[in-house]
Image (cartoon, rainbow, N blue to C red):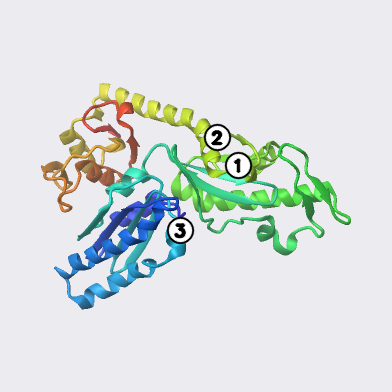
Amino acid sequence: MRQFSTHQLLSLLDKHGPPCISLYQYTHRHHPDSLQDPIRYRNLLREMESSLLQKYDRKEVRPLLEKFQPLSHDGEFWNHRTDGLAMLAAPDMFEVFELQRPVQENLIVADTFYLKPLLRISQSADRFQILCLTRDRAQLYEGNRDAVDPVELIDTPGTITEALGADLTQQHQSVRSAAGQTPIYHGVGQKKEEVDRDRDRFFRAVDRGVMENHSKPTGLPLMLVALKEYHTPFRNLSRNPHLLSMGVDVDPGAIGLDELRALTWEQMEPLYLERLALLVREFEIARTRQLGFDDLSEVAAATAAGRVANLLVEADRQIPGRVDLEFGRIEQGVLHDPEVGDVLSDLAGAVLRMKGQVVIVPKERMPTDTGVAATCRF
């Protein structure tokens, strides 16, 4: 799975040359339900072609369709799906994102991308990353309360051999022990100190790669899952500010994805609830100082003025219309019109552009009943 960051979302919010194609599809993780996914995808492509030909010449449409068509019969691709799929294309770009929550099937051809589903998922407060670590292997996962999936490592070694190469101590071998037991090392002339030194160099390379290429771009909290004897050495050398103080003491190779999700969410849930409670308290304090707003018109005006530092948005809430940022006002509309869209998504996108924080919050945790709660800088 490719990770999705706020930086990528902001780049998609920028203007791209039309037509901008936004395809969202509900997908299935398991056979036999997954068999229907490529069929539905091909149906969406036919619908896409018809929609494009209403406004553009076939000569312009062909290169756009060619971006999507290679996946039509790619069995390997369709056999490894998550809960949803987002595909965004314009004449100058094509991006595919795997989603860990189901999305409503949608195909929109417009002058800008339809980003509401991506925004809702990427800014959800329950997202986090997991580093599964052994003495000689590393794997990164991203998840939420509902699902955990492996993330493709970027400039980060997945094995000790990949990290150290020719610098790996000769005769470096080990017999993998049972969970919780001390590993038994062997090799001609090899000492435990040399093994530990190689391990630490590997851990340092993993920490550096994960921090620079995964933690910083996403800003997500990182949980360590490893045997107990590896927690202390890794934490002693880690420089990653997103690494959480708690972790899971288990051999990551001995558990499946569902157990990994359950064990890590058990640790994450109190932090998630604490973070939401803190954001709500900050909003309540700001409201007593006339710096917190839940009226949509006031939030729109504050957003247009660049005042909003934190914006809480109710998950699954939709308010038809658009935000006129030039004048800071809301224009009413109908939700099914993609040119009108959703007021809450417009507000969230504008706050992100202006370097504010957007957090998608479950309805039962929202401090207001209007769908928004804005805490202002001034």
Nearer the observer, 128 or 46 = 46
Left or right of residue 281: residue 251: right
Q: Which residue is mark 2?
A: 263
Name the quarter where the C terminus is drawn.
top left
38 over 82 or under it: above or below: below
Three-letter amino acid code of the residue under disc 3:
Asn
Disc 1 or 3, which lies upstream in sequence?
A: 3
Q: Secondary structure at mark 1?
A: loop
Q: Amino acid at mark 2?
A: Leu
Tell me the crowding category of disc 2: few under 14, some 14 to 19, or many 20 or more residues within 10 angstroms, Cα based: some
Residue furthest left as drawn: 332
Residue lying furthest bottom: 59
Q: Which residue is mark 1?
A: 255
Callout 1, which amino acid? Ile
Task: Please name the residue shown 66% across and 60% down the image.
Answer: 162
Closer to us: mark 3 or mark 2?
Answer: 3
Horizontal and vertical percent position of residue 369: 23, 27
Q: Say which residue appears at 26% left-offset and 46% top-offset.
A: 350
